[in-house]
Image (cartoon, rainbow, N blue to C red):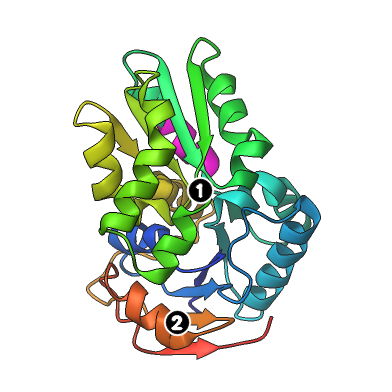
Amino acid sequence: MKKPIGIFDSGIGGLTVLKEILNALPGEDTIYLGDTARVPYGTKSVETVTRYSFENARFLLKFNIKLLVVACNTASAYCLHRLQQELPIPVVGVIEPGARRAVGITKTKRVGVIGTEGTIRSGAYFDAIKAIDSSIAVFTKPCPMFVPLVEEGWTNNQMARLTAHTYLREIKKQWVDALILGCTHYPLLKDVIKEIMGKDVALIDSGHETAAAVAQCLMKRGILEVASSQQGSHRFFVTDSPDRFRQVGGKFMTANVDTVELVNV
């Protein structure tokens, strides 16, 4: 029996990761859970985010998933290792793949990281980058207002530009040549961020690298769906406001997100 891949995020941002998974593994079935009733995770405590993450995981396990993707950077920073230890299936996060990519492309060895307050406070990206190459200078900046901007669908207006300029002016002065978008919501602001940081700064979102890590994990375990002409099926669940999820999520997903189910996890 074909088993799906489970993915959860605090809201719609994880769709940026799902999109890359669908591009890389079009034959796979997926179950996506956006915890839109409790977004954002980045301002909450380690204990609260951990509890939410295990509740999300238990919900997805009901669908007999074969692998779990923690698409939320804050959850990956706070409790990925616990999820990996305690769940009966493989669990892939988004931080290590993004860190590896940044280390691989920086020429100046000056890397910036923007993320939620929780992700930046955890030091997870800093530690992951330093573990790969301790000589790289890492500059971090929390950007908490980016998540509500994306959830509202304000990704390319004057409000987004003013907010981005306020957050990014400090990190731009550090002359980084790679900037990790350390939250799955942030790629939706990529045009505005690129406009401010300039063409010489590579923007890294973890979606592409995470999809590659998922494929490698499935292949290693012999549970990768063999590529075929048959497209996978995809289900979407949210904990609040399906209409908003459809409206905003549909702007950047190639898969159909018209059918979104409201659940209580």
At x 67%, y 38%, the residue is 122
In the rendered view, tell whether residue 129 sits above or below residue 47. Answer: above
Q: Which of 53 and 12 lies nearest the eye of the viewer?
A: 12
CA separation in Å, label 1 and label 2 = 25 Å
Q: Is residue 90 left or right of residue 49?
A: left
Comparing marks 1 and 2, which lies closer to the viewer?
A: 2
Q: Quadrant of residue 199?
A: top left
The mark that comes first in sequence, 1 or 2, is 1
Q: Secondary structure at mark 1?
A: helix
In the rendered view, tell whether residue 63 sits above or below residue 106. Answer: below
Q: Secondary structure at mark 2?
A: strand
- The spot of residue 85 in percent (x, y) is 76, 51
At x 58%, y 27%, the residue is 126
Question: Label 1: which residue?
Answer: 220
Q: Is residue 77 left or right of residue 148?
A: right
At x 44%, y 48%, the residue is 210
Density class for disc 2 (Cα within 10 Å; few <14, some 14-19, many ≥20) is some
Work out whether residue 212 can be spotted: no
Principal secondary structure, stretch drawn in magenta: helix
Q: Which mark is residue 3?
A: none
Question: Label 2: which residue?
Answer: 235
Q: Which residues are magenta?
A: 95-101
- The spot of residue 249 in percent (x, y) is 35, 73
Amino acid, disc 2: Arg
Q: Is residue 93 left or right of residue 185?
A: right
- The spot of residue 198 in percent (x, y) is 22, 31
100 in the magenta segment: yes
In the rendered view, tell whether residue 247 sits above or below residue 70. Answer: below
Amino acid, disc 1: Lys
